[in-house]
Amino acid sequence: MNEKVYNIDDLQNVNVDGEKYIILQIGPSHPGSGHMRIKVWLDGDIIVKVDPDIGFVHRTSEWLSERREWIKAVPIVERIMLPDTVHANLAYVLTVEKLLGIEPPPRAQYLRSLVAEINRITSHLYGIGIFGIFLGSSTVYMWAFGDREPFIDLMEMLTGARITTSYIIPGGVRWDLPNGFKERAETVLQYMERRLKDYEDIWVKNPVVQARTINVGTLKKEDAIALGVVGPNLRASGVYYDTRKHQPYAAYSNIDFEVPTMKNGDSYDRLLIRVEEIKQSIRMIRQILKDIPEGKIVADQIYNQLNPVMKKNYEEKKRVMFPAFMIHMRPPAGEAAAKVEAGRGEIFFYIKSTGDKYPYRFRWVTPSFRNLPYFTHVAVGHRLADLPTIYGSIDYFPPEADR
Amino acid sequence: MSEVRKPRDPVTGHVKALAKGFKYLVEPNRMTLDYPAETMKLPPNYRGFFTVDDKKCIGCSMCEMVCPPEAITMVPRIIGEGGKTIPAPEGEKEAKGPKRTKRPVVNWGKCIFCYFCVDVCPVDAFIPTQVHDLAFEKDSEYRPSYEEYLKPPEEPYKNAKKVVSKADLKRGVGYDPAP
Ligand code: SF4
Ligand code: SF4
């Protein structure tokens, strides 16, 4: 890391020796920038200032959701956070449930945690894979994307879709555990545990990776808190904070798990924390499948509105159909907010209802957006070649930030 | 966590990484499906193309109302012999009058396969299938007429070898011949 102090606000674009900074535009149509542009000021090849230019994939999810019936926002929020759909779905539904005053039954809570943890593993594998290709390792890129597959298969078996599951609805979930799910999940978990050892040798403890990531893009604990960073990136800086522990939702208050934290907050720690979280998620999935209580998968308020055909379907196929309430729901006037720990950090939802058939105000903040200060803050002083390391390690997903 | 973080000594590290790479070179971990020579038989709740049971449907329009991308259009129909419907006269937009009813048609260009319509139907009139890999050549094929929509979707590769996926301890995803 370069120790020279730069005046970042110096818009003259000249350095102390009177030489001009080079201004480099990385993206938006660049394989190493995602759907965004990163404007970089360089002194030689030392980064002086970074200005991320976001908004290229802004999809007006809030505006769209304010002009639709409540249930129709579920697919919209899912499509914003594609590697992490379940968490977006869950966060939205938790907010609506608070407005409606519905409490899902325990089995539904466990099923929610189950898909959430499966999804967290796929999301972290996605992040690790992208980090790999940013550092030039196509091996780990292929491995991680391949190893998402068994987990996506599990989601498919449970929810009927691979990615955009739309599984969680106000009051419960849409399908119960299919036959043979537990055995299949156990095989997948054992496979993943073995593969994590392989990842360790080929990637995590690879001297090349360590050389390129240790002490690169360090964010200190105090700075992480001050900048409002969330999720694994925050915990990599040593802050013990996880919404699942501190404000438990779904079944997390009954599940025994640890929140791994690191000390240094550099790119290597941000990689390690994802590996550790995968291990914790594996542990959680085992517990959930062992402890899952019997019972209904949808709240009585919804169940009682099902007509006889739907009730028959529920008994025979364990499939929750939608009563007309789902279309015509009008949550009572009021405000509600909910938080969910997604793969990349905390999602925050705020919804205001006026008792109408559409939400009056629909506001959500996604984790990638809150991890944005990383770019402006940690890259300064590094060489340009370290920028992909920093970008890859924070697992930034532009469509998620732009919403 | 400090022991996790400790840098590996370079020689051991490189040797271990190379050895692991060599192991997978000799014994690759392939989970690829040879599509379309092999196609997968999907779980019964997989959300693929679907059609509607003309006799069961009561024309209530609930599916149209719940569809998030507004992919469903209701077409006016007349109830004919044996509960089957026949097209309403040309130019008739409203389903008013004796024996008039409506039936849903899905625009496949808009549908996101959320199955909200299938689940909201009060008489469970939709017939789901697991066909998911249809391709359309023309824009107009996305928007079938009601008669076209009633035909059950056909699988594109009928002669392909059918397999079912399973969890495999060695490869992650494995395939068994479909029963
Ligand atoms: S599956 Fe979803 S998107 Fe497709 S027609 Fe039904 S409700 Fe509309
Ligand atoms: S919801 Fe069912 S019965 Fe009503 S119009 Fe649609 S298919 Fe027909």
Image: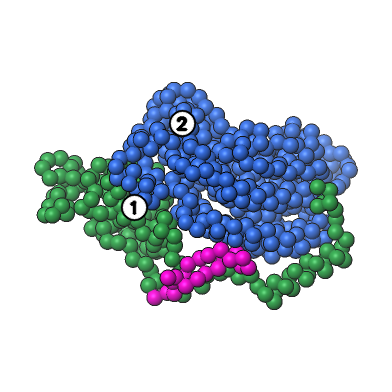
Chain colours: A blue, B green
Residue A84, magenta (yes or no): no
Nearest to the observer: residue B145 or residue A237? A237
Identify whether B142 is placed above or below B34. above
Question: Dot 2 falls on which chain?
Answer: A
Decide whether the magenta segment is chiefly helix, strand or loop.
strand
- Residue in the picture at 42% in, 63% down: B133
The x, y position of residue A282, in whole percent, is 64, 52
Amino acid on which the number 1 mark rests in the picture? Asn
- Residue in the picture at 71% in, 42% down: A259
Residue A19 located left or right of residue A125: right
Amino acid on which the number 2 mark rests in the picture? Ile
Nearest to the observer: residue A191 or residue A170? A191
Q: Nearer the viewer, mark 1 or mark 2?
A: 2
The x, y position of residue A190, in whole percent, is 64, 60
Query: Cβ(mark 1) to ligand 1 < 8 Å?
Result: yes
Specify the quadrant of the image occupied by residue B143.
bottom left
Identify whether A130 is placed above or below B73. below
- Residue in the picture at 77% in, 40% down: A237
Looking at the rendered structure, whether the residues under marks 1 and 2 are on a common chain is answered as no
Q: Which residue is denoted by mark 2 in the rendering?
A: A102
- Residue stretch rendered in magenta on the structure: B159-179
Q: Which mark is residue B107?
A: 1
Q: Which mark is residue B84?
A: none
Number of residues whose C-alpha sits closer than 10 Å to that of mark 2, classed few (under 14), some (14–19) or many (20 or more): some
In this orientation, does residue B87 appear?
Answer: no
Question: Dot 1 falls on which chain?
Answer: B
The x, y position of residue A380, in whole percent, is 79, 43
Quadrant (top left, top right, bottom left, bottom right) of the C terminus of chain B? bottom left
Is label 2 in a helix, a strand or a loop?
loop
